[in-house]
Image: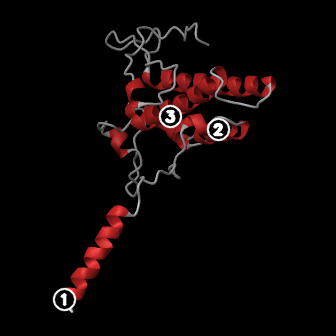
């Protein structure tokens, strides 16, 4: 009986090693590359809808965007004993303010993908009017995200603290591969976005 088990295992092992000549390659189901997703108006519109939806979260135009800076500045104190909201901001714990930063740079990344798809011909079959509309929406979203970053993480002219006069890092191109990742420094002065790209 043991001999039969070993023979069956050997036969199954041989079939498993020699049955396929090529490795099966499939596109991932959980994510699609921008070069595939942004070739149609439907894909671009879906990405823009995602950006719209992300601006509806509490960190953008809800309570957190208004309350977090006030708590960090000690203008507001949570006096409730049965609620832990904003305790990390009260204690100014490391990372407690990064939610808005991450959300806004995610919006900028997606907006840059749409702008790139329109400018570099990735988007196919869309009318010129639709391409202009898509690019205009993406430029608006990118500007709105930078505005939110500037009011939360930049200096306020005339109210500099300890000589801090820097803005936020400006990223105008999408990052599609690891070798395209950049780590730009904060801009020296927050005097407006000046670019000859768009």
Where residue 191 appears, as percent x and y from the top left, is 51, 8
Please identify the quarter of the rendering in which residue 94 is found: top left
Q: Quadrant of the C terminus?
A: top right
For residue 156, say whether it is visible: yes
Residue drawn at x 77%, y 28% as measured from the top left: 130
**Mark 1 crowd level (few <14, some 14–19, many ≥20, 10 Å Cα):** few
- Hey, which quadrant is residue 161 in on the image? top left
The alpha-carbon separation of the residues under discs 1 and 2 comes to: 64 Å
From the viewer's perspective, is residue 77 above or below residue 187? Answer: below
Instruction: Tell which circle, 3 or 1, labels the residue nearer the N-terminal end.
Output: 1
SS class, disc 3: helix
Cα–Cα gap, marks 3 and 2: 12 Å
Task: Tell me the residue that label 2 is attached to.
Answer: 52
Q: Is residue 181 visible?
A: no
> Looking at the image, is 150 positioned above or below residue 91?
above
Q: Residue at x 30, y 75 (%)?
A: 11
The numbered mark, 1 or 2, whose residue comes first in the sequence reads 1
Q: Residues within 10 Å of mark 2 (few under 14, many from 20)?
A: some
Image location (x, y in percent) of residue 25:
47, 50
Q: Quadrant of the N terminus?
A: bottom left
Left-right relation of 167 to 93: right
Q: How many numbered circles are shown?
A: 3
Of residue 84 and residue 4, the one placed in the foreground of this image is 4
Say which mark, if any, is on residue 106. Answer: 3
Q: Are marks 3 and 1 in contact (CB under 8 Å)?
A: no
- For the residues labelled 3 and 1, the Cα–Cα distance comes to 59 Å
Q: Are marks 3 and 2 in contact (CB under 8 Å)?
A: no
Name the quadrant containing residue 35: top right
Residue occupied by mark 1: 2
**Res. 85 mark:** none
């Amino acid at each position: 009986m043991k001999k039969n088990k070993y023979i069956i295992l050997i036969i199954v092992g041989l079939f498993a090693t020699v049955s396929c000549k090529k490795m099966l390659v499939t596109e991932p189901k959980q994510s699609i590359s921008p070069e595939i997703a942004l070739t149609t108006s439907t894909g671009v519109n879906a990405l823009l809808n995602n950006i719209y939806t992300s601006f509806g979260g509490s960190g953008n135009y809800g309570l957190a965007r208004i309350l977090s800076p006030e708590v960090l500045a000690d203008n507001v104190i949570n006096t409730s004993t049965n609620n832990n909201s904003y305790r990390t901001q009260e204690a100014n714990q490391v990372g407690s303010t990064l939610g808005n930063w991450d959300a806004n740079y995610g919006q900028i990344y997606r907006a840059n993908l749409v702008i790139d798809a329109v400018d570099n011909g990735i988007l196919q079959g869309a009318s010129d009017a639709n391409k202009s509309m898509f690019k205009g929406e993406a430029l608006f979203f990118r500007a709105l995200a930078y505005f939110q970053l500037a009011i939360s993480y930049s200096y306020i002219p005339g109210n500099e603290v300890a000589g801090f006069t820097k803005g936020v890092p400006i990223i105008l191109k999408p990052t599609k591969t690891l070798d395209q990742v950049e780590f730009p420094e904060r801009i020296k002065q927050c005097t407006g976005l000046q670019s000859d790209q768009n």
